[in-house]
Image: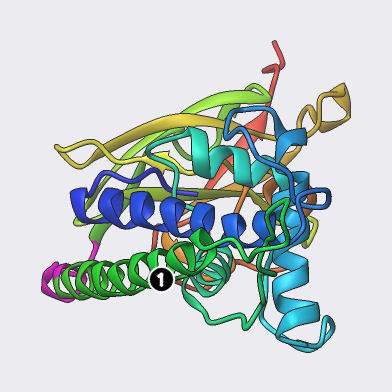
Amino acid sequence: MEKADNPAIDVEMRTLREGIKNKYGDYHRQDEKRFPNLEYNTNRVNYEPLRASFEEEFYVVRKLDRAKNTIHIPSTKTFAAIFCDEHYVPGKKILNTCRSYAEGASQIVVEEGTSATGQVNTTTASKKTGSIIRIAVIILLVGLVSYLVINQLYSTPPASGLVIRRPQKKQFVTRKSFIEGSVLNANTVWVVVKPQKKDEYYFQAPIKVKSDGTWMGEIYVGSASKGSDGLVFEVRAFVRPVGAPESMEVLESTVPTSWPEAELSSTIVEVVRGPKKK
């Protein structure tokens, strides 16, 4: 997905991270064996208990149907990116799931602890009160940030002028090739590569647009074998395509069967997979 370059989005992601940590803290107090203390680092294995708490929240506590809902629980790799990459922003479905987990009232009950003499631990009530206050503050902050982001999105002119400048039509290219172009009023460009005689459409990794409107990145044309040499491929660029992969995991495993619908698309550039015949 895109990397955040908007201060408002950075604030929202920081707020979301704290909200997830606070909710997981409730699960930790409820069952320390199933939900131990976490270290929020780049080790994906550390996030298995957090992912388990998401499943507990939506499928056990809230009793949502696993087969008929829009919940998209992040993978442990995505959790590592959320907490360790300050500029990472997950896809919309995963983002909404994380917000629901952090902000929603799950109705879980954290049992009150007792002291060695059998007395109720008096700090439990204050912890619950503190959690409620933190959640209320998070909801208010998220609402404010969402309002600012939506306001900015609606005030931004629509994207226009999307063109591919390199490679050019009928140009011979290698499997790993550079691509560049320009666009107005867009932060990210998605490139899709299609073998001319097949209904296979391969999304490439998103390319960041520079402040001057130019963009440049790498694409993969055909397979690693020489069987792709001499074949014609169609290359096309898009702004905000529908169905764009939400993560690198999805990017590597999903092959659509048609060009995506998008806010803006370029013309098709036909290239020939090299090496060029002498």
User: Which residue in the protein does label 1 denote?
Assistant: 129
Circle 1: element type: helix
Residue type for callout 1: Thr
Describe residue 225's horizontal placement relative to residue 207 as left or right. Answer: right
Q: Quadrant of the C terminus?
A: top right
Determine whether 252 is above or below 55 in the image. above
Horizontal and vertical percent position of residue 60:
80, 79
Which residue occupies 66% across, 69% down?
110
Which residue occupies 30% across, 69% down?
142
Which residue occupies 77% across, 70% down?
56
Describe residue 23's horizontal placement relative to residue 11 as left or right. Answer: right
Horizontal and vertical percent position of residue 125:
49, 69
Q: Nearer the viewer, residue 272 or 198?
A: 198
Q: Residues within 10 Å of mark 1 (few under 14, many from 20)?
A: few
Determine whether 228 is above or below 102 in the image. above
Q: Is residue 162 magenta?
A: no
One can see residue 252 in this view? no
Horizontal and vertical percent position of residue 99:
48, 69
Describe residue 4's horizontal placement relative to residue 159 as left or right. Answer: right
What's the coloring here?
Answer: rainbow
Q: Nearer the viewer, residue 130 or 184?
A: 130
Part of the protein shown in magenta: 152-159
Describe residue 93's horizontal placement relative to residue 161 as left or right. Answer: right
Labels in figure, total: 1
Q: Nearer the viewer, residue 276 or 23?
A: 23
Horizontal and vertical percent position of residue 75:
72, 50
The image quarter containing residue 266 is bottom left
One can see residue 240 in this view? yes
